Image (cartoon, rainbow, N blue to C red):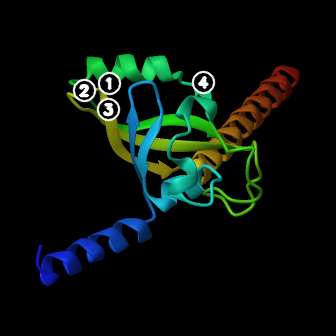
C-alpha cells in the first residue's frame, strides 16, 4: 500500500470510530467479533476492545428474544431493518451507555439493522432509541388519561340530562 491508501484507511477508521451509531459484527451465537467504540459505550463498555469477545446474550433482555430475531432474520431474506430490541447495560461499568443518566443494569432500547452473512456472522448497525420509546410511552399515557376524562365528562353529561328529563 502506498502512503495515500494508508491515509485513506486511517481516515475511514477515524470516521467509523467517531460516528454516533453502533457498528458491529457478531458470530451466529452472539459473540462480538468487531465493533466500533460507540457500540461498546452504548452497552456500558469503555471501548470496542472490552466489548469484543463478550456475548450479546449476556446483555439481551429478551424483548424480543435473540432466537426470535434470528428467525425473523431468516424469514426476511437474511436482513432486518429498524428491529427494536431491549438490552441491559453491562454490569461491569458505571454511568455510561446511550443515555447520560444510565447506570449499570439499566435497560435501553436499540433499533438494529442486521444482515446474515454466508459465513454465519451478523453485521449491521445499532441506534439507541430509548428516549424515543420513553416519549412514546408518555404520549400513550396522556392519550389514555384524555380518553378517561372524556368518558367521565360524557357520563356526567348523560347523568345531568337524565335528571333534567
Quarter holding residue 89 = top right
Residue 37 visible in the snapshot = yes
When asked about the image quadrant of residue 70, the answer is top left
- Residue at the farthest front position: 1
| Residue 112 drawn at (x, y percent) | 42, 41
Q: Nearer the viewer, mark 1 or mark 3?
A: 3
* Residue depth check, mark 2 versus mark 3: number of the one nearer the observer: 3
Do the residues bearing badges 1 and 3 touch, measured as CB atoms within 8 Å? no
Quadrant containing the C terminus in the rendered view: top right
Depth check, mark 4 against mark 3: the one in front is 3
Spatial separation of the CA atoms under disc 1 and disc 3: 12 Å
Q: Position of residue 3 (x, y in %)?
A: 15, 83
Quadrant position of the N terminus in the picture: bottom left
In the rendered structure, find residue 62 and report the number of the disc placed on it. Answer: 4
Element on which disc 4 rests: strand
- How many residues crowd mark 1 within 10 Å: few (<14), some (14–19), many (20+)? some
Q: CA distance from mark 4 to mark 1?
A: 16 Å
Quick one: SS at disc 2?
Answer: loop
Q: Are marks 2 and 1 in contact (CB under 8 Å)?
A: yes
Residue at 68 percent of width and 44 percent of height:
90
Amino acid at each position: 500500500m502506498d502512503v495515500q491508501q494508508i491515509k485513506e484507511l486511517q481516515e475511514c477508521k477515524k470516521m467509523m470510530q467517531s460516528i454516533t451509531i453502533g457498528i458491529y459484527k457478531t458470530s451466529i451465537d452472539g459473540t462480538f467479533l468487531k465493533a466500533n467504540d460507540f457500540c461498546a459505550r452504548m452497552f456500558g463498555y469503555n471501548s470496542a476492545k472490552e466489548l469484543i469477545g463478550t456475548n450479546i446474550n449476556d446483555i439481551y433482555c429478551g424483548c424480543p428474544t435473540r432466537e426470535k430475531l434470528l428467525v425473523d432474520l431468516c424469514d426476511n431474506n437474511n436482513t432486518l431493518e429498524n428491529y427494536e430490541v431491549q438490552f441491559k447495560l453491562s454490569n461491569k461499568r458505571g454511568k455510561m451507555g446511550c443515555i447520560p443518566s444510565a447506570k449499570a443494569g439499566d435497560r435501553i432500547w436499540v433499533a438494529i439493522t442486521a444482515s446474515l452473512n454466508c459465513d454465519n456472522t451478523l453485521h449491521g448497525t445499532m441506534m439507541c432509541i430509548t428516549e424515543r420509546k420513553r416519549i412514546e410511552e408518555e404520549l400513550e399515557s396522556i392519550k389514555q388519561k384524555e380518553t378517561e376524562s372524556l368518558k367521565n365528562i360524557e357520563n356526567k353529561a348523560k347523568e345531568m340530562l337524565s335528571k333534567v328529563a
